[in-house]
Image: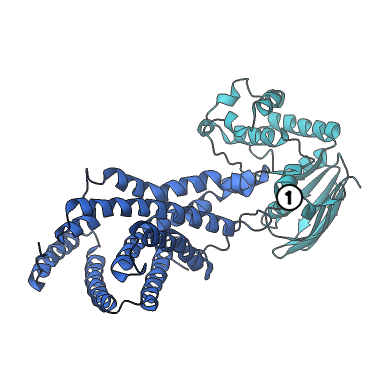
């Protein structure tokens, strides 16, 4: 079955729903209308743009082009992780850490999936590589940013407790262990919950898209299962990496808590 | 050499501070608010960055691991922090809980104190329990930041006597920060006024 093409009018009708929501937000004084409209416009422009880019990329599949687009996506994801933190690490370190954990969480897992599980030839075939990487980046970015934000905020708020434990002769790992474990859970639980609810409470986006695109439901389900496992693993390892790297940065070589490296809320 | 030496210790814009404390000696530090008394204790405990050296019984702080140094040179901050629900959970082992019973009794606690909820403790109870929590680890040096600030007169006397006994019996060294010069003249062999640029010895 060929997919039914959507017209500009169809998309405009859907957009009107968001406009109605923005008007309601304005009338109720929620203050979300501006952000809602900007995000809606951003989403439309970005997706249309990536549509054009993907069309070009699919027609001219080459490793350098795929690598270039993947790197752009990674760098933006690293920035987004940092942008969502209340207390960021000062300077370039925070960016390197968030980008580094996205490499671990998304790049390596996508590479493994393409070469071992999907087994497409060549492995960088953009029809597979870009959507897989995009889904992984989008999902793991949430986990990594949630965990990182919580870690820097909690270490700041609970600095007295952490230092008290250091004063009692605890190592930095012991002194910050409860906070770090809590942050890891914060980063991973949304992914674990979405795995548990998949197919019962929600029909995941990728599977829905494939079914709408004409794939057999069973093929779509298999890809969705693969993606869910990859996202869970990617998010988990990404969160572990980010928490470890940020924690190391928050303690110096004499295991002292160093909070000078954190910016004030809202500043970098 | 037995004792603790601070050798040109400086941090932020304070110092250099130099001082030698003999085994079993208690010295007092006094100074106006904000001059850096607490920061000085934190520098000796090595929880803030500093220059200069701290040498305990001939061993520099740099030649032992930070947790080991902080176990030997233990600070009891003015405000204590707790992270589990009950008092007993903050003691590392059953042995520690058992060993601390005598100290706890001396400081006026009943035998069921280990089951007490932290959220129900008064400021004074927290201060006394924080002292026990540190003493039970057997440090060689105690860094005390206003250890009796939240206690009544009777309990101040008990804590002063307890710490004097510990210094005498265990040869523990003590740096005692207080705003009360009369208290320092009771508990300390020598009292120093902390200034931004160093110490001046007080005559009590």
User: Is residue A104 rendered to the left or right of residue A132?
Assistant: right
Does A147 sit above or below residue B172? below
Nearest the viewer among A191 and A125 is A125
Does A136 sit above or below residue B108? below
Nearest the viewer among A115 and B15 is A115
The image position of residue B46, as x and y in percent, is 71, 53
Is the N terminus of chain A in the top left, top right, bottom left or bottom right quadrant?
A: bottom left
Q: Which residue is mark 1?
A: B65
User: Which corner quadrant of the image does residue B92 belong to?
Assistant: top right
Does B115 sit above or below residue A45? above
User: Is residue A211 rendered to the left or right of residue A248?
Assistant: left
The image position of residue A235, as x and y in percent, is 40, 54
- Callout 1: chain: B
Does A185 sit above or below residue A258? above
Nearest the viewer among B113 and A45 is A45
| Colour setting | by chain
The image position of residue A24, as x and y in percent, is 15, 60
Look at 64% across and 24% down and name the residue there. B109
User: Is residue B3 rendered to the left or right of residue A51?
Assistant: right
Look at 60% across and 24% down and name the residue there. B113
In the image, which lettered chain appears blue? A
User: Which corner quadrant of the image does residue A143 belong to?
Assistant: bottom left
Q: Is residue B151 visible?
A: no
In the image, which lettered chain appears cyan? B
User: Which corner quadrant of the image does residue A127 belong to?
Assistant: bottom left
Q: Secondary structure at mark 1?
A: loop
Look at 69% across and 59% down and name the residue there. B49
């Amino acid at each position: 079955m060929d997919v039914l093409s959507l017209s500009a009018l169809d998309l405009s009708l859907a957009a009107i729903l968001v406009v109605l929501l923005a008007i309601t937000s304005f009338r109720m004084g929620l203050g979300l209308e501006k952000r809602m409209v900007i995000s809606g416009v951003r989403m439309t422009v970005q997706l249309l743009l990536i549509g054009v880019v993907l069309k070009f990329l699919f027609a001219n599949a080459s490793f350098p082009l795929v690598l270039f687009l993947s790197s752009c996506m990674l760098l933006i994801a690293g920035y987004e992780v940092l942008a969502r933190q209340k207390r960021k690490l000062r300077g370039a370190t925070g960016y390197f850490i968030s980008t580094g954990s996205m490499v671990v969480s998304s790049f390596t897992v996508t590479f493994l999936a393409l070469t071992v599980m999907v087994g497409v030839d060549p492995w960088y075939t953009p029809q597979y590589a870009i959507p897989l990487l995009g889904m992984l980046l989008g999902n793991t970015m949430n986990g990594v940013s949630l965990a990182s934000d919580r870690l820097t905020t909690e270490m700041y708020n609970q600095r007295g407790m952490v230092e008290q434990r250091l004063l009692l002769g605890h190592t930095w790992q012991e002194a910050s262990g409860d906070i770090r474990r809590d942050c890891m859970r914060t980063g991973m639980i949304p992914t674990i919950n979405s795995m548990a609810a998949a197919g019962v409470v929600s029909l995941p986006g990728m599977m829905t898209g494939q079914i709408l695109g004409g794939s057999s439901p069973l093929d779509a389900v298999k890809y969705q299962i693969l993606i869910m496992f990859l996202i869970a693993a990617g998010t988990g390892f990404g969160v572990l990496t980010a928490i470890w790297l940020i924690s190391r940065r928050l303690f110096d070589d004499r295991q002292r808590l160093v909070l000078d490296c954190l910016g004030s809320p809202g500043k970098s | 050499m037995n004792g603790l030496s601070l050798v040109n210790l400086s941090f932020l814009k304070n110092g250099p501070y130099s001082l030698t404390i003999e085994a079993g000696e208690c010295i007092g530090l006094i100074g106006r608010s904000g001059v850096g008394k607490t920061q000085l204790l934190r520098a000796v405990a090595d929880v803030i960055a500093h220059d200069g050296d701290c040498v305990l019984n001939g061993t520099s702080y740099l030649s032992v691991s930070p947790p080991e140094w902080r176990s030997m040179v233990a600070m009891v901050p003015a405000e204590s922090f707790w992270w589990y629900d009950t008092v007993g959970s903050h003691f590392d082992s059953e042995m520690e809980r058992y060993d601390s019973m005598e100290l706890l009794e001396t400081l006026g606690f009943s035998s069921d104190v280990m089951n007490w909820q932290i959220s129900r403790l008064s400021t004074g109870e927290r201060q006394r329990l924080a002292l026990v929590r540190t003493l039970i680890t057997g440090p060689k040096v105690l860094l005390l930041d206003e250890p009796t600030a939240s206690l009544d007169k009777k309990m101040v006397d008990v804590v002063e006597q307890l710490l004097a006994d510990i210094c005498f019996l265990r040869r523990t060294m003590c740096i005692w920060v207080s705003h009360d010069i009369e208290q320092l003249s009771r508990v300390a062999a020598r009292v120093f006024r902390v200034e931004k640029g160093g110490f001046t010895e007080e005559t009590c």
